């Protein structure tokens, strides 16, 4: 096993687990379960950010083709979505956790659609999942060094990756939109308008 693969595998596992937990947040219909799951997402996301920053710092501070350098080079695709996670996702998950905590005093308290719509926001699940997916090419390259990486293979991999990220983004956006529509209260009809209809 390549030595830098031992660095990338735990990092990938943390990010993929965080993405899996974040993806399930909008499906939770009780506030206590949502509060507990957001705690897992927050813990895994902060762990992933810490490990990613540690690998990048170790790679920048070392000289030559060390395992830390190779592991840091493998995080090139994951760096941008990890920054989005640090800037946006962590803050949104903290707000979501606080909102769920306010309603989680009783175990059967339902999670309102507005809270679930916040959980389905694309800036919660999408950056975390894209960060995990961004590390997978480096893991594949480290685990199978004899894999051919010509221009055609690279182009195909980029196309598949972009289409996959776009599909995940559209799925998050549609789910968020559907829950937002449920959270908007129905507008009551005006009694004045109703009276005018009966005249």
Image (cartoon, grey):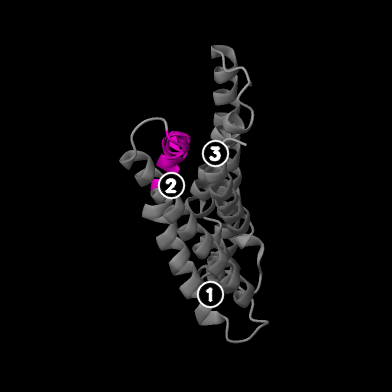
Magenta-highlighted residues: 66-83
In the rendered image, the quadrant that contains the N terminus is top right
Q: Is residue 192 above or below residue 54?
A: below
Q: Earlier in the sequence, mark 2 or mark 3?
A: 3
Q: Nearer the viewer, mark 2 or mark 3?
A: 3
Q: Is residue 33 above or below residue 82?
A: below
Residue 26 spot, x, y in % from top left: 61, 61
Query: Mark 2 packing: few (<14 Cα in 10 Å), some, or many (20+)?
Result: many
Q: Nearer the viewer, mark 1 or mark 3?
A: 3
Query: Mark 1 packing: few (<14 Cα in 10 Å), some, or many (20+)?
Result: many
Res. 115 image quadrant: bottom right
Label 2: which secondary element: helix
At horizontal 57% and vertical 18% (from top left) the residue drawn is 149
Label 3: which secondary element: loop
Q: Nearer the viewer, mark 2 or mark 1?
A: 2
Residue 168 spot, x, y in % from top left: 59, 42
Task: Tell me, for residue 77, which label it has, or none.
Answer: none
Task: Tell me, for residue 3, which label it has, or none.
Answer: 3
The answer, for residue 176, to whether it is visible in the render is yes
Tags 1 and 3 touching, CB below 8 Å: no
Q: Earlier in the sequence, mark 1 or mark 3?
A: 3
Query: Mark 3 packing: few (<14 Cα in 10 Å), some, or many (20+)?
Result: some
Q: Which residue is mark 1?
A: 100
Q: Considering the whole magenta stretch, tell me its main secondary structure.
A: helix
Q: Earlier in the sequence, mark 2 or mark 1?
A: 2
Task: Tell me, for residue 82, which label it has, or none.
Answer: 2
For the residue pair 90 and 45, the one nearer the viewer reads as 45
Q: CA distance from mark 1 to mark 3?
A: 42 Å
At horizontal 48% and vertical 59% (from top left) the residue drawn is 47
The answer, for residue 185, to whether it is visible in the render is no
At horizontal 44% and vertical 68% (from top left) the residue drawn is 95
């Amino acid at each position: 096993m390549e030595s830098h693969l031992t660095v990338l595998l735990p990092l990938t596992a943390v990010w993929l687990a965080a993405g899996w937990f974040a993806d399930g947040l909008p499906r939770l219909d009780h506030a206590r379960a949502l509060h507990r799951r957001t705690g897992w997402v927050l813990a895994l996301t902060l762990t992933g950010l810490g490990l990613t920053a540690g690998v990048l710092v170790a790679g920048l501070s070392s000289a030559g083709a060390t395992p830390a350098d190779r592991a840091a080079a493998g995080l090139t695709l994951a760096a941008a979505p990890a920054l989005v996670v640090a800037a946006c996702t962590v803050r949104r998950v903290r707000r979501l956790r606080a909102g769920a905590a306010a309603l989680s005093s009783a175990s059967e308290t339902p999670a309102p659609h507005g809270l679930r719509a916040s959980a389905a926001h694309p800036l919660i699940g999408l950056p975390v999942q894209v960060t995990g997916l961004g590390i997978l090419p480096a893991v594949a390259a480290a685990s199978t060094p004899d894999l051919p990486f010509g221009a055609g293979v690279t182009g195909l991999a980029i196309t598949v990756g972009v289409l996959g990220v776009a599909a995940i983004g559209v799925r998050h956006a549609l789910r968020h939109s559907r829950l937002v529509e449920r959270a908007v209260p129905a507008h009551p009809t005006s009694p004045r308008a109703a009276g005018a209809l009966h005249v």
